[in-house]
Image (spheres, grey):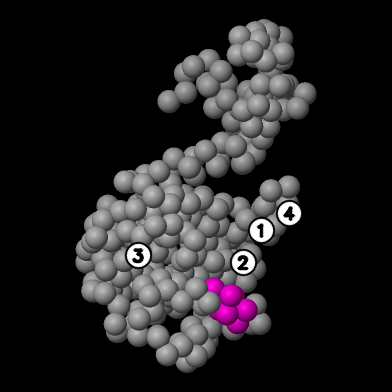
Amino acid sequence: MTFSIAARSDDGESWGVAVASKFLAVGSVVPAAVAQVGALATQAHANVAYKGIALSHLDEGATADIALQRLLEEDEGRDHRQVGIVDVDGGAASHTGSACIDWAGGTTGDGFAIQGNCLAGPEVVEAMRSSWEAGSGTPFAHRLLAALTAGDGAGGDKRGRQSAAILVVRDGAGYDAGDDIDVDLRVDDHEAPVVELARLLELNDLYLVASTEEEKVAIDADLRTELEDFARAQGQPDFHTWVGTENYEMRVDDALAWIDQRVLDIVRGTSA
């Protein structure tokens, strides 16, 4: 009923899960991850207790293989479970119980575990693996999403589409550095959930990721006048207030020394 990838980034700084299913709010059930510990996906007849138990094993130093072994030893419902685990070092393990709905299976490699059940066929997992392995150098969350998109394009859940989610953790990545949540996006009920998840990830980047030097456009006197005039036309007293209203603080300098090209395109009505 579900296909997923649990993975660690190549630089060893991030862990995450991307998942899709013909199931309401799959993101509330399947993914779990803690920075500098690992990530896992629990699905099929999901045992949600796996999340806390497995992360505890990993935190105590267990490898993905050992953590998986312990989960299965303690679970009489193991034949109905499917789970993928990636540990702190990128070791990966995946289990598909014998009672999981056909087609069901998975694959692992350095830093990733891919698995799915009730799928259109093995081509779903194969497409996800090919995408992941070809994506080195792609920003981690987008690499996870690309693998999920590949699986969706290969047929995904044979019952159809309903929900998708992506979770990425990294030390200090949370809001105001208060936790490790880098990305936590969920599409709970949608006719094209993976496509919608991609849209949300783009918004996440726009609102919550700092501009690079290449993205910054210097604000001179003429541009500042243009921006202030725009803000007043939008019913705001000044451009700084408009920025705060639209949540673009990560993309515009507080002192208006620079503006992100994407926000400038929005101001000028030229964004795609």
Type of amino acid at the residue the image marks with label 2: Val
Q: Which mark is on residue 22?
A: none
Q: Earlier in the sequence, mark 4 or mark 2?
A: 2
Looking at the image, tell me whether mark 3 or mark 1 is earlier in sequence order. 3
Name the residue at 33% across, 46% down: 192
Q: What mark, if any, has residue 178 been given in the picture?
A: 4
Is the C-beta separation of discs 1 and 2 under 8 Å? yes
Location of mark 2 (residue) = 34
Q: Tell me if residue 56 is in the magenta stretch.
A: yes
Residue 2 numbered tag:
3
Q: Is residue 271 in sight in this rendering?
A: yes
User: Quick check: 165 left or right of 262?
Assistant: left
Residue range corresponding to the magenta coloring:
51-57
- Whichever of labels 1 and 2 marks the residue nearer the N terminus, that label is 2
Q: Horizontal and vertical percent for residue 89?
A: 58, 73
Single out the mark in the foreground, 3 or 1: 3
**Tags 3 and 2 touching, CB below 8 Å:** no
Q: Earlier in the sequence, mark 4 or mark 3?
A: 3
Pointers 4 and 2 in contact (C-beta within 8 Å): no
**As displayed, is residue 219 above or below residue 8?**
above
Mark 3, mark 2: which one is toward the viewer? 3
